[in-house]
Amino acid sequence: MRIGARQAEKWIIWGGCLITLFFWTAFNDPFNAPKSWILSVVGFWLFGWIIFQFKNQWEIKPLKWATLLSGIYIITLGISFIASGNKYISFFGEYQRRTGFLTYFCLIIFFLSSSYIFRLDNVRILETALIIIGFISAFYGLLQHYHHDFVPWSNPYNPVLSTLGNPDFAAAVMSMFLVANFGVALQSNRPTWLRSITALNSLFLLVVIQFSQVRQGLLTSVLGVSLILIIWLYQRKKYISYAAAGFLVVAGSLSLAGMLNKGPLIKYFYKTSVSYRGDYWRAGWNMFLHHPLFGVGPDRFGAYFRQYRDLKEVTRRGPNVVSNAAHNIPIHLAATGGIFVLLAFLSFTAFILWRGLLTIKNSRGDQQILASIIFAIWIVYEAQSLISIDNIGIAIWGYILGGIIVGISVKTPKESNRQPRERILQPLISGLLSLIFLIISIFFMGAESSAHILNTIPIPRTQSDLNAYEIAAQRPLNYVFKEPTFVLIHAQDLAQGGNFQDAIQVLQNMKEADPHNFEAQNFLAKIYEYQKNWAKAIAVRSGIIKLDPHNYANLLQLAEDYKAAGDLINAKPIATLITLIAPNTEEAKQALTDFGK
């Protein structure tokens, strides 16, 4: 392997580990923000490396197809980004998600780099990494379960967050690590000490996943382990492997039905949260049907969710419970990217699936087991992606593994010596691209740190305190990139300090820049209501109906505004509408009390 390829291999694997493990409590978003910065810096180093690989890799048919499909995927995402109404969010991603165009571009670069580099004879570094990161994730999850976490998180969930900030994400990534460790333990050609360690690590991960109380983590673990065992049995007793495969299909179908509140296994697998995901899927599909060509823009699901959710979702959980992801990656990409992104993604995924099955079919013995392990881990990622989101710390392994699957399906070609031009230019270009995104990340770090510090400052009680507070509130906006969430916080701080004029101006600017920003418009209406400026409050809340047609809380407040303005003629029909669409809510009771039948 070339020296440059060895470096790229380490950037891929250890970069992936760092992305999953790293968080920083000094930031307002301690999880996704730093992960996205690391992803960008490493991804663009790899992009500089890939530039010099296209010509040679293009001659290898599977890698030619991998390059084509990756390029189409990036181009369709880029077109959706260009068509988006909010370029900042579509490029950098929704706050505390960060899965915009930039993230997907870097993930695809990780995929392509992995496909160019890895073959069956150099994939052991992946096993090593997944053993180490699996143990660290489980150990930290165990500390959290027993309330010995070294970070005092403000956490409304199960305490097992690991390094991803959410039990669902923690269980999903640990199930991938569990399958990797189990696979190593099953390989007879590996040292006994290593097999013993990975077997214990598998049990350790299983226990911590159970502590997380996330059932899909257990189910995907069983799925991955079962796939490996089927191949292992196939090498020994084919008829037993066929029976095991049949059992897995039947058991998997019944489990899936149970999760969807159907069949005999409902009490074991159904959770109310699955119904919530169904709400998100319907909203995403409705979003796609109304924006079929280019979607609403990468990572813009949350901005349009209120508009395209149905009344069933609103009355189930209340109008203020929203989502900024479809919790199903194909639906999410369809809604945010449109039909071309969806087709590109499905083709990309189908290609990886085909290459994985082909590799398992064409390999024998230990190599077949090794290929099946990598394939099984990737299948675990794909399975969880149908009911979850592309969290950066999980998605990185889905794309790395996808690339490795393509790479190991290729017979290792004889490599020529690296040319002097590549030896000099590649590190230079990779370093320059990484440096650019490191500088960009530093700007974001400053804003995140300033926002976090602002949260620690008590509410001002004197004029001098207020002046200092306003200066601190301005700091997150003193950087090149102005995060819309921080702009909204700034407007709220201005209003809290009594500076309504500037707060209104900031909110109006936000409304003009992004007409789908519900939070900015809702807060603007509250300011007008506080000022008893009923005409302007009515105008804003009437506009909100277009963004959130089923929001009966907004409808009630609009009726109250009309009433305060002395316009009962317009107020009563709105109040009557609330009692019709949401009769069993507190808002309906309030409407009856204030306006009668």
Image: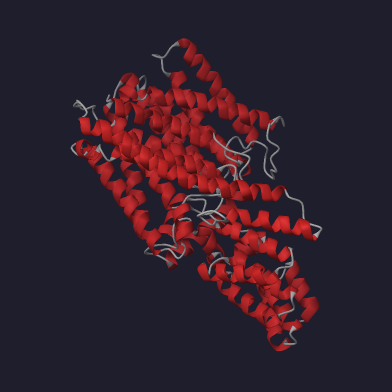
- Residue 19 position in % (x across, y down): 49, 36
Residue drawn at 40 percent across, 40 percent down: 434
Residue 276 horizontal side relative to residue 80, left or right: right
Which one is nearer the viewer's eye here, 19 or 375? 19
Q: Can residue 353 be seen in this view?
A: no
Residue drawn at 31 percent across, 43 percent down: 351
- Residue 278 position in % (x across, y down): 55, 55
Q: Is residue 52 visible?
A: yes
Which one is nearer the viewer's eye here, 539 or 231? 539
Image mark count: 0
Which one is nearer the viewer's eye here, 495 or 558? 495
**In the depicted structure, whether residue 205 falls above or below residue 69:** above
Q: Furthest-front residue in view?
A: 464
Q: Quadrant of residue 171?
A: top right
Residue 450 horizontal side relative to residue 14, left or right: right
Color style of the picture:
secondary structure
Q: Furthest-top residue in view?
A: 192
Residue 415 horizontal side relative to residue 111, left or right: left
- Residue 24 position in % (x across, y down): 59, 38
Q: In which quarter of the image is residue 342?
A: bottom left
For the C terminus, the quadrant is bottom right
- Residue 233 position in % (x across, y down): 39, 23
Which one is nearer the viewer's eye here, 134 or 198? 134
**In the depicted structure, whether residue 430 falls above or below residue 418:** below
For the N terminus, the quadrant is top left
**In the depicted structure, whether residue 27 falls above or below residue 143:** below
